[in-house]
Image (cartoon, rainbow, N blue to C red):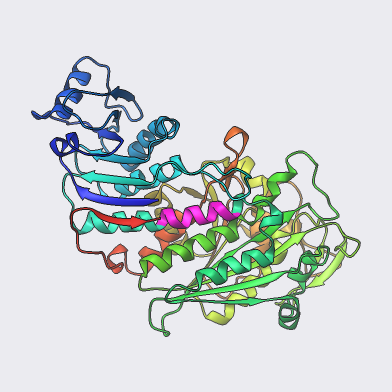
Amino acid sequence: MNFEITPLSLAGACQDKSDALIVLVSEGFKPGKDALSQLIGHALQAKDLEFKAGKVLPGYLAPGIHAARIWLVGCGQGSAASVKTAISAVMPAVKSAQIVNLTVVMVSSLDAVALQAAVQGVADGSYVYTTTLSKPIARKLKKVRFGVPVLNAVAQTAFDTAVATVSGVELAKEWANRPANHATPTLLAQAAQQLAKSAKLTCQVMGPKEVAKLGMGSFMSVAQGSREPLRFIVLQYQGASKQQSPVVLVGKGITFDTGGISMKPAAEMDEMKFDMSGAASVLGVFKALGQLKPSINVVGLIPACENMPDGLAVKPGDVVTSMSGQTIEILNTDAEGRLILCDALTYAERFKPAAVIDIATLTGACMVALGAVRSGLFASNDALAAALLQAGEQALDLCWRLPLDDDYAEGLKSNFADVANVGGRAGGAITAAKFLQRFAASYPWAHLDIAGTAWKNGAAKGATGRPVGLLLQYLLAHSGSQASVKPRKAKTGVSSRA
């Protein structure tokens, strides 16, 4: 989709040639003499339109306004959350009307976060998955112009960041939405190699022989029951000097999870194609980095494989040796995500990282605890935890910190290995994090459990692309705030493609 940003007054919006207008009306609006201002003023006076976020008043062929369709939408005080609510409320109507060219008009200036929320809301509301449809439903919305009262460098940078975030989120959605036979470890690796064609990006892909040579016995144990060969993907973005320590992102890449010998129930097992959403989010972040080119070094590690119940599959009670040398008793083969992540966390040590963040659809327990609103956050470092929490708030991609008390690790004790891979039902999200923490002792580490936030169920079933927004916001702040992203000179009609 093509996005543009331009300075645009309400009077100018009356002459806009788009198919439709969305007009975000915030508190404190004062009508001018143009037709659109008068329409808004009369609607507010008649109480047909409210400032409350998400209140929508549709219009058609209004006198003095070129666009045939108009949606006046209340957005409260213009906060990011209110703008997100407003855009979410109106986009189903825009999508249903099959609008091709759309202009979103802000009657008053929005801050950077609210502007980003508007861009991301339009993209999310118009997203269509098409890859495996015999007759793909094309995304009707082709061009969106955002009209702001004043276009300055801050607004331009916020817009550029939002467009790059949208690009990353949609790549994450694409790969998480794909059926497992269209998103094998090999295909996932090819997607990473495609990203590496951008400047400052490189990609290395390792197969079973290379992984065996590294001693990743835990990772290999999960893959041994599948005919699809595992892949270990190493992406690197270098936007700063080689002397600067990178941030390492580790994404769980289980491209399909049957549970292995500890097989899952049949109901909703199709959703286990989403079990590589952590890996998909890493791909999405790297796509955005390739567009923004911030001054930071980032490494992406993706251990990718299937978890299948073949005759060679790992069995409950088997003991394997991880890359760290620690032995693991596998009591439940459906707790496989931590088994592939632990070796990747050990591998991360060679980069001497400033911080390591792993992202995984890891536990149903986290879904029970936090639902679909906030991702679970665990961290060994308070400063890293605070930075991720703040990034989530700014990106409207929320997380919540959960504890890592050593007492929770008691259930992971084993009589036959250094550690067991599960610790019982109680506190399952925490015991999973405690398992991972054993392999991340040499650097600041955080774990994001996105089991509840990576996808939606029901009629809206599909990937959300989270937490690409949170991670990108954190990385930009880590690189010295978004000022490190060189904005283009603000001018009329600046456009970007997502």
Main secondary structure along the magenta-highlighted residues? helix
Q: Report x, y in % for residue 284.
A: 50, 60
Question: Which residue lies at the image location 38% right of the left edge and 83% below the top edge?
Answer: 241
When asked about the image quadrant of residue 491, the answer is bottom left
Q: Report x, y in % for residue 101.
A: 33, 41
View extreme (front): residue: 135
Looking at the image, can residue 261 be seen? yes
Which of the image's four quarters has the C terminus? bottom left
View extreme (right): residue: 311
Looking at the image, can residue 114 be seen? no
Asked if residue 170 is among those painted magenta in the image, a careful observer would answer yes
Q: Is 9 positioned to the left or the right of 194 in the image?
A: left
Q: Is 229 positioned to the left or the right of 274 in the image?
A: right
Question: Which residue lies at the image location 73% right of the left edge and 58% below the top edge?
Answer: 410
Is 219 located above or below residue 213 in the figure? Answer: above
Asked if residue 214 is among those painted magenta in the image, a careful observer would answer no
Q: Report x, y in % for residue 326.
A: 75, 74
Is 222 located above or below residue 41 in the figure? Answer: below
Question: Which residue lies at the image location 54% right of the left edge and 49% below the top edge?
Answer: 375
Q: Report x, y in % for residue 443.
A: 54, 73
Question: Which residue lies at the image location 70% right of the left edge and 54% below the top edge?
Answer: 180
Query: How many numbered discs, if any?
Result: 0
Q: Nearer the viewer, residue 113 or 422?
A: 113
Q: Which residues are magenta?
A: 165-175
View extreme (top): residue: 46
